[in-house]
Image (cartoon, rainbow, N blue to C red):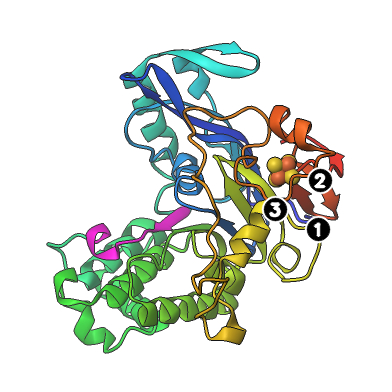
């Protein structure tokens, strides 16, 4: 990356504490990523890989009393006058950690102080400098307020527009930009009167109406039917070329990432397995590839077979085995129980030593003993 990043996540760890099991669930376990201005970073992985918790941790939106969030999230948005700001700064004041072998094994925490600090530190960032769109847009919109009022409110709160008539005109403009059918009619409707696809367009309009520096889209197509999904992806692609909003795109659907992302991070077992330009990470035939990325790509329907392939018994190939239990992260490579690329030469290392995230080509990092590259931590 040549330009200074807009957002840089350094060694982010978000652990939840299970009182019943007296153990930590390591939902995010040492994630380091960066997004350049104007770039779309796609974070992809199966359910439970930690991608959504990574996004939520950036904004302190992690519910369920996280045991701890550590690391740094440097954000250069807003007026940018004072340079990047660590959104997680000073959180450590509220916790004391006990570590063993570099891992956190116990935490004592001032919970009310932690909560109040997060609210203070992030109140002006959320919605304004960093906006989010979620899956299930219907439940994310306020059911008692018309769509138009909700978007107008975002305009008033975040752009300095004070006149109701101007806020309304801007809101209508955003409804047009997200290709909402009959925007003037939809403006006065409540979310319940709109389809799922329309609600997602309204959510996108509301997020963009605050003119954020960064947009976080967390599974923006999940829960919509297939036709609507592809229309929302087409809309996001159009908006990307029109406005160039820097975007962190979280999805389990590798096809969505391949359509929209400039760079891709593949997450597994709460950490990053591969990170690099989309053309290197996702393009078939481009090597090296992480065995987990290869397995994800192999699980996609093939265009040559109209999506109906395949394997011996006619079913889509799936990645064998279960996703890793982040309460009991195994020794060695987190993917070793499911990996079909282990060779005798590296078996002992795969089982006993976690690979570092190593640089294998310019801007391309991988966590695999098959591709030792140049280790730089992270
Ligand atoms: Fe597979 Fe070993 Fe590479 Fe892990 S380190 S992905 S187990 S080959």
Whether 14 is drawn above or below 7: the answer is above
Report helix, strand or loop for mark 1: loop
Is 6 left or right of 205, judged from the image as shown?
Answer: right
Whether 87 is drawn above or below 308: the answer is above
Disc 2: which residue: 370
Q: Quadrant of residue 143?
A: bottom left
Disc 1: which residue: 288
CA neighbours of label 3 inside 10 A, class few (<14), some (14 to 19), many (20+): many
Q: Residue furthest left?
A: 144
Report helix, strand or loop for mark 3: helix
Which of the two residues, 359 or 238, is positioned nearer the viewer here? 359
Asked if ligand 1 lies within 8 A of label 2, the reply is yes
Q: Which residues are magenta?
A: 130-141
Is 193 left or right of 30, judged from the image as shown?
Answer: left
Disc 3: which residue: 291
Which callout, 1 or 2, points to the residue nearer the camera? 2
CA neighbours of label 2 inside 10 A, class few (<14), some (14 to 19), many (20+): some
Whether 150 is drawn above or below 310: the answer is above
Ranked by sequence position, the earlier of labels 1 and 2 is 1
CB contact under 8 Å: marks 2 and 3: yes
Which callout, 1 or 3, points to the residue nearer the camera? 3
Asked if ligand 1 lies within 8 A of label 3, the reply is yes
């Amino acid at each position: 990356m040549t330009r200074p990043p807009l957002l840089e996540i350094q060694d982010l760890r978000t652990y939840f504490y299970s009182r019943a099991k007296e153990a930590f669930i390591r939902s995010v376990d040492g994630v380091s990523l960066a997004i350049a201005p104007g770039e779309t970073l796609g974070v992809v992985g199966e359910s439970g890989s930690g991608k959504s918790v990574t996004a939520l941790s950036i904004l302190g939106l992690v519910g369920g009393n996280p045991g701890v969030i550590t690391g740094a999230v440097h954000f250069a948005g807003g007026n940018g006058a004072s340079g990047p700001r660590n959104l997680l700064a000073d959180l450590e004041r509220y916790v004391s950690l006990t570590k063993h072998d570099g891992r956190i094994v116990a935490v004592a925490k001032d919970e009310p102080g932690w909560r109040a600090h997060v609210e203070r530190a992030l109140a002006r960032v959320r919605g304004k400098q960093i906006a989010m769109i979620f899956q299930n847009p219907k439940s994310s919109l306020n059911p008692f307020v018309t769509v138009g009022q909700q978007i107008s409110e975002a305009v008033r709160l975040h752009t300095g527009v004070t006149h109701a008539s101007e806020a309304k005109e801007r809101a209508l403009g955003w409804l047009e930009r997200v290709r909402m059918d009959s925007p003037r009619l939809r403006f006065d409707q409540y979310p319940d009167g709109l389809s799922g696809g329309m609600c997602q367009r309204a959510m996108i309009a509301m997020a963009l109406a605050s003119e954020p520096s960064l947009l976080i889209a967390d599974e923006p197509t999940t829960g919509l039917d297939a036709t609507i999904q592809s229309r929302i992806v087409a809309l996001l692609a159009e908006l990307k070329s029109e406005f160039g909003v820097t975007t962190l795109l979280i999805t389990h659907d590798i096809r969505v990432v391949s359509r929209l992302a400039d760079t891709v991070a593949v997450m597994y077992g709460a950490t990053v397995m591969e990170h690099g330009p989309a053309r290197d990470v996702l393009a078939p035939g481009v090597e090296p590839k992480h065995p987990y990325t290869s397995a994800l790509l192999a699980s996609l329907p093939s265009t040559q077979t109209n999506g109906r392939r395949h394997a011996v018994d006619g079913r889509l190939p799936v990645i064998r085995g279960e996703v890793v239990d982040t309460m009991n992260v195994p020794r060695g490579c987190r993917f070793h129980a499911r990996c079909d690329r282990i060779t005798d030469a590296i078996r002992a290392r795969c089982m006993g030593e976690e690979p570092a995230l190593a640089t294998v080509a310019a801007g391309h990092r991988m966590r695999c003993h098959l591709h030792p590259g140049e280790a730089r931590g992270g």
